[in-house]
Amino acid sequence: MSAADVHYELEKQVPELQDLEERGIFSAQEIKSIVKKRTQFEYQVHRHIAKKIDFLRYIEYESNLEQLRRKRKKRLGLDKEPEPGKSGITISDYSLVSRIHSLYQKMLKKFKGDVGLWQQYFEWARKIKSSKTLARTFAKAIQLHPNKSLFWIMSASWEFEENGNIASARVLLQRGLRINEDSQELWIEYFRLELLWLHQLRERRKILFQKEQELQIHESPSQIDLPETQDQPSALERDQVIADSKNEGTQSMLQKDLNPMQKALLEVAIPRAVYRNAIRAIPKDLDFRLRFLDVYKDFDQVEKGLDEVYESIQSDFDQPEALKVLCERPLLGVDRETVAYPDALKEILDNYDQHAVQETRLFGFYADFLKQELLLVQEPHLRAYLNHALLNCFQKSLDAGACSISMFMDWIQKCTQEDKPKVVEKALASYPSSYLAWQEYIRLTGPSQRVYQEALESVDPQQKTMILQDYLDYAIEHLKQQETLELFEQHLNKSTILKYLQFLHSFDIDLMRKEADRLESKYKSKGYYSQQIELESRLTLSKTARYRMNQLWDKIHLMDPQDADQWLNHIQFEMEHDPEHAGQLYFKAKKHVQDQEAFDVKFQQMKLA
């Protein structure tokens, strides 16, 4: 864009700026500053390759300017009621908002695919209640991005919440689902919309017919107009309940005498129809159905809908996760502080006991449920009841051969000290290759060489490292030095080498250095060298130690020259002992690290510390 074009844009702003100065909202000096800033922004947003950040900064500047204008107008008393026959509105009252709209639209024209920018514009326009612009922009966004569920949901939400237009909100979500039939978010939000409308309707009817007065519902004239399509109606739109509901708006449902169809709508007919169509479109997803239950929990008088969801889960799924949901249904909507809770709890335990006999995988969910309730319930008698039920659950799962190792660990924590030995022995008998079972057994019986050797021979190869680390810690503390050395030599590998060097360091630094050099070719790594540096630094620093530490850091730099933290550690060490060498290291590091700016910031912070 040429300089002439930029000046043309600025010239269009002259009346607005004159108005701001004449009304005393901004001084002449401030107007000059505004012109200078806008000139910079105009050149930036109109350059050949525009950047989003330029538009966003311009928008932020104009938004702050508008906020300042409003505050000053109020302070100067210019927001008072105008005299009769005068509007009281001048060009500066709307010009800044118009410019922000224009900037957003120009930015979205260049960056159509950026969903976040569209969302930001929607939220801003909604905040300032720009209804007509929102209606047009929602329609444009949906046309450009018909597969983005977010836009359909935001537009329907605006129609319903801001405009009170349930019919338009329905049409939008139905159109969205025609295009995106497998969008779980669209199905859930359409379902929620119908429940919200039903809840509002019931509340209005309650007020209307308690007071016997007429209640008028006003819908906004601004609505989103999408172009008509030639697509066939979807299965959802052909659903009889959905089709019939199109003729039932809020006003028609506020008549005192309702026809049979209208009465059915008050009995959750539309949400139930939405649910049936949703599970037909997405049939084998249990988590999807559970989301409908979560939405139902926020509303009253939805028992028929809840029944339908639970019945569909029972008929369509046989996995333990589905049985868990069915078993725990009696607690739905029950407050744990009320007298209804004990009865609901007993019914749930009966359900689990009944179903776990056939499906033993259910025991894990059974135990998890009881543990969760113990976290939520404070009443002593109920806690005792839950604890007893949990111990029974563990025993029943063991009898059924379904007690997992994690359940055994919970059982060991919950049982009495008297029963603990028996439970630990049962855990080890059931899971002889489990590190966790052996860990509990060693904790119970006390550590010894014999037990650790037996555990090493028994545990799963993938868990052997953990038991070996425990064994070596025991050996370092309890066995003779020579016995511990032999044990290390017997089990020396990548998982034990650092502990081995640490052990040697505890009694002979020279032996540690000798062994580290001997084993370097086999175990060399950044961690291997870093461990040695850390061990060397623990002793009173000698020339030998400092020379060796520098050598070790050099090997790390050679292995990973881009590791900025290791360069900084090396530089910091040398700053205390040889500042000249530290400077050499700094310039050497600058040649290798990727983020030099971040490196310099950390280096300066280190110097000041």
Image (cartoon, grey):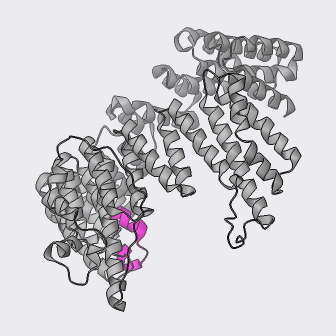
Closer to the camera, 341 or 398?
A: 341
- Measuring from the top left, give residue 564's x and y in whole percent: 69, 21
In the image, is residue 295 above or below residue 591?
Answer: below
Q: Residue at x 39, y 79 (%)?
A: 337
Residue 104: in sight, yes or no? Answer: yes
Residue drawn at x 67%, y 13% is: 557
Q: Quadrant of the image for the C terminus? A: top right
**Number of numbered tags placed on the structure image:** 0
Residue 393 quadrant = bottom left
- Whether 214 is drawn above or below 223: the answer is below
Picture quarter containing residue 598?
top right
**Residue 423 appears anywhere in the view:** no
Residue 181 image position (x, y, % from top left): 24, 44
Q: Residue at x 29, y 78 (%)?
A: 254
Which quadrant of the figure contains the N terminus? Answer: top right
Magenta-colored stretch includes residue 307: no
Closest to the observer, 576 or 255: 255
Q: Magenta part of the protein: which range?
A: 369-384
Q: On the rendered structure, is 506 left or right of 182? A: right
| The magenta stretch spans residue 378 | yes
Measuring from the top left, give residue 459's x and y in whole percent.
34, 34
Answer above or below: position of 403 versus 14.
below
Q: Position of residue 256 (x, y in %)?
A: 25, 84
